[in-house]
Amino acid sequence: MKKKVHVVGAVIENEQGEYLCALRSPTMSLPNYWEFPGGKIEKGETKEEALIREIQEELGCTIEVYEQVEDTTYEYEQVIVRLETFKSRIISGNIHKTEHAEIRWVAPEQLNTLRWAPADIPAIECLMK
């Protein structure tokens, strides 16, 4: 039986209406795919708390979490991932990439030009409407 993983992703928007996109590094699972930054929900955490903690760890900044964008379950070769994405914005700190190969602000109409991790695609389609 495949392992199930519940993760959250931050759809971080800036003042220009662009979204923060993160390129998975060659050492990560699903290397060289773009994703919304985030990670696993720890025991006892709410989705929002998990997202705030993950962004603090991965990008070194503090976010505020708003409404949900998408809730997707995707079956990869090794694992089944449930990804819940939430709109958010940075309220303090500057972005420092610690895990990702690249961080890029992308306009909504350009989102489909990147090679996204399959679980992130429904959120992209939602944002491009």
Image (cartoon, grey):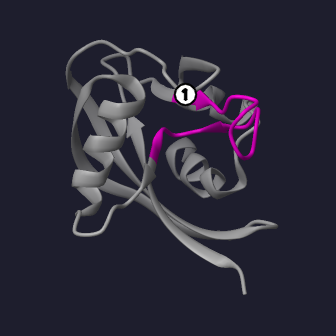
Question: Relative to 110, is 78 above or below?
Answer: below
Among the 4 quarters of the image, the one containing residue 26 = top right
Q: Is residue 52 left or right of residue 2?
A: left
Range covered by the magenta-colored residues: 21-38
Residue 46 percent across, percent down from the top left: 23, 63
Q: Out of 56 and 71, give the one closest to the viewer.
A: 56
Residue 32 percent across, percent down from the top left: 76, 32
Q: Residue at x 64, y 76 (%)?
A: 3
- Circle 1: element type: loop
Residue 93 percent across, percent down from the top left: 23, 15
Q: Out of 68 and 100, give the one closest to the viewer.
A: 100
Question: Relative to 103, is 31 above or below?
Answer: below
Verify whether residue 106 appears in magenta.
no
Q: Residue furthest bottom?
A: 1
Q: Out of 122 and 38, give the one closest to the viewer.
A: 38
Among the 4 quarters of the image, the one containing residue 128 = top right
Label 1 crowd bin: few (<14), some (14–19), many (20+), radius 10 Å: some
Q: Residue at x 23, y 48 (%)?
A: 66
Question: Relative to 109, is 38 above or below?
Answer: below
Among the 4 quarters of the image, the one containing residue 5 = bottom right
Q: Inspect the image, locate mark 1, and give the three-letter code of the amino acid beneath it.
A: Glu
Counting the numbered discs, the total is 1
Residue 1 percent across, percent down from the top left: 72, 87
Q: Residue at x 58, y 26 (%)?
A: 100
Question: Relative to 84, is 27 above or below?
Answer: above
Q: Out of 44 and 14, give the one closest to the viewer.
A: 44
Task: Decide whether the magenta segment is chiefly helix, strand or loop.
Answer: loop
Q: Which residue is mark 1?
A: 99
Q: Residue at x 22, y 69 (%)?
A: 44
